[in-house]
Image (cartoon, rainbow, N blue to C red):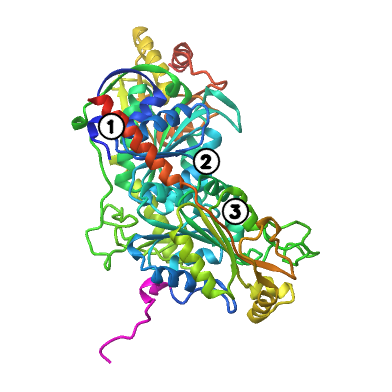
Amino acid sequence: MSEELSHPLEDYLRRRMIPHIWCEGCGNGTILNCFIMALNELKLDPNKVVVVSGIGCIGRISGYTNTDSYHTTHGRAIAFATGVKLAKPELKVVVISGDGDLFAIGGNHFIHAARRNLDIPVICANNFNYGMTGGQYGPTTPLNAWTTTTPYGNVEHPFNLVHLAAASGAVYVARWTTLHVRRLTESIKKALQKEGFSFIEVITPCPEIYGRYNKMRTGMDMMNWFKQASEIQHYSDPAKAEITPEKIIIGEFVDMEKPSYGRLLSEMIAQVQRKKGEGNR
Amino acid sequence: MAEKSRAVLSGVHFMNGDIACAEGAIAAGCQFFAGYPITPATEVAERMAERMPEVGGVYIQMEDELASMAAVIGASYAGVKAMTATSGPGFSLMQENIGLAAMTETPCVIVNIMRGGPSTGQPTMAGQQDVMQAKWGSHGDYEIIALAPSSVQEMFDLTIEAFNLSETYRVPVIVLADEVVGHMSERIVIPTPDKIGVIDRKKPRVSPKEYLPFKPDEDLVPPMACFGEGYRFYATGLTHDEMGLPRTSSPKAQQRIVQRICDKIRKNADNIIMTKETMLEDAEIAVVAYGITARSALSAVRKAREMGVKAGLFRLVTLWPFPDRLIGKMAEQAHSIVVPEMNCGQIVREVERAAKKTPVTFLPKLGGEPHRPVEILEAIRRTY
């Protein structure tokens, strides 16, 4: 054969990095798939997209996307992305990272980027634990769940991420699971086009690490939980969307308009320059 | 971007050191400042908040120093000259991402206006206690460059130099000033833009397909593509190969990257190091000093000469990489060396190491006030 067959999305993947490191049954590949589908459907120029990630299993995603990409220190993806976006506002800067990275060690950066209404989408892979280090509890681990550092059950209350994002000022907030690939892709497209800070929580299975301690040993077990428990309730109160074993409320929680930090900043700079120019005349 | 003429405030000024530092950054082409307020570096931030919009740049006040340093690296990777300014406690927080900047070879400038530590210590008083932290503050092996200004003029000049060195070697450069130099006001001459040498990072000379983001040239420094230029590259704080891809279990990859990020500074040390030698030609006693301490030392050396004591001053302008060779050469002639420092003994250890057999007298000063010239003069006389 003279012509090599290629997948339509191949240009979005950094081939030298494939195969990926993720476990069987992990949902991170689904998130990567939905993300590059969204880029493709929006016909975004990959030369103008920057993917930034932190540390953890999903943190490796910036290596797999064939865009400019950067793998930061633990928790600092949003802070790094802030510098990129402000320095080159014409770039589409996306943060994709995990629940521990974004909400434990990086929690401060998340709430402040949301407050500023920085022009970036943040996609959080929530697998309820620290997978990369072998399954310790984190800021989203459900009460009573078992992990390697909650051998007697978790006695800490978890964050409700969509509530946190909404309260911090995000203009677009959604939650999906990796079962909802079409809706997730549409949601990512929406976030990529939104002015301001958008946040998508993706509940993702971690059967190898989290699931095995919590009676969901396979990817199918975890997906079955998502299927049974998830319920789409668009624009419901994010404060009441806590994840329980019985119910995972999904959908869009917030979709509003608010001038972004980038817009206000560039308007301010333009105004200063105008005044300075007048003063010089 | 604004015209260069508006960016550079050419002329004679009476200016505060922190403000001169901000003006130096702007003259060097800085277009991005991210920081967090902290005494005694706040004036750098305040000046940048006012001046960045004027020159078409960005000032952002981040939520902490961890974020400030991360944002600076992000801006630099986006192709913009970037800096932050802080003091001891904030410098400690920045160490995490200074390591990331070293590992991903990011041109950037960190200004540390040193106050007294440890911990919150003496916010409004001077210290020279972060000298070793500047060199060794982040974990792992790496090299940085640190410059120690002694005057308001040098706050301007050395901040430009810091940007130029960071762009040349793709390395974080630290302007390691002290509270006295940061807060005092002096006469300063800002040259016209055509008299200011500005260096920009070297760009790839190959197509995106052939580009290896961490493949060095002969000077051990890799050309740097930036985001949005079509190179579509990947950078990570993990141990990586020339392609930039993680090679965390490869002893060879680890050896190569760590050795190179150290060697690109060590092997270029002679081109980096700046010192200022005064009356050392026939000196029997040499004072080695930096920052504000060097000003007191100069006064002491002059007094000693008036008294017939053959004293001279070796001023460290570059603290890191340390001028081993130059100190060694100087020590061959001097009978003894005096090192005054506003700490419990930091650069003196380097001097002792480089001076080999020549006896070194350490003159510490804690409390937040600089040495008085008479204190250094006394030490010179005691060792004579």
- Kindly identify the amino acid type of the residue bearing the numbered disc 1: Ala
Residue at image position (31%, 35%) is: B55
Is-magenta flag for residue A115? no
Mark 2 vs mark 1, foreground winner is 1
Q: Which residue is mark 2?
A: B65
* Image quadrant where residue B303 sits: top left
* Element marked by disc 2: helix
Q: CA distance from mark 3 to mark 2?
A: 22 Å
Up-down relation of residue B205 to residue B322 (above or below) = below
Quadrant of the image containing the N terminus of chain B: top left
Q: Is residue A225 left or right of residue A270?
A: right
- Visible in this render: residue B60? yes
Q: Residue A234: horizontal and vertical position, in percent? A: 61, 64
Q: Secondary structure at mark 3?
A: helix
Q: Position of residue A9 (x, y in %)?
A: 39, 76
Q: What number is the disc on residue A165?
A: 3
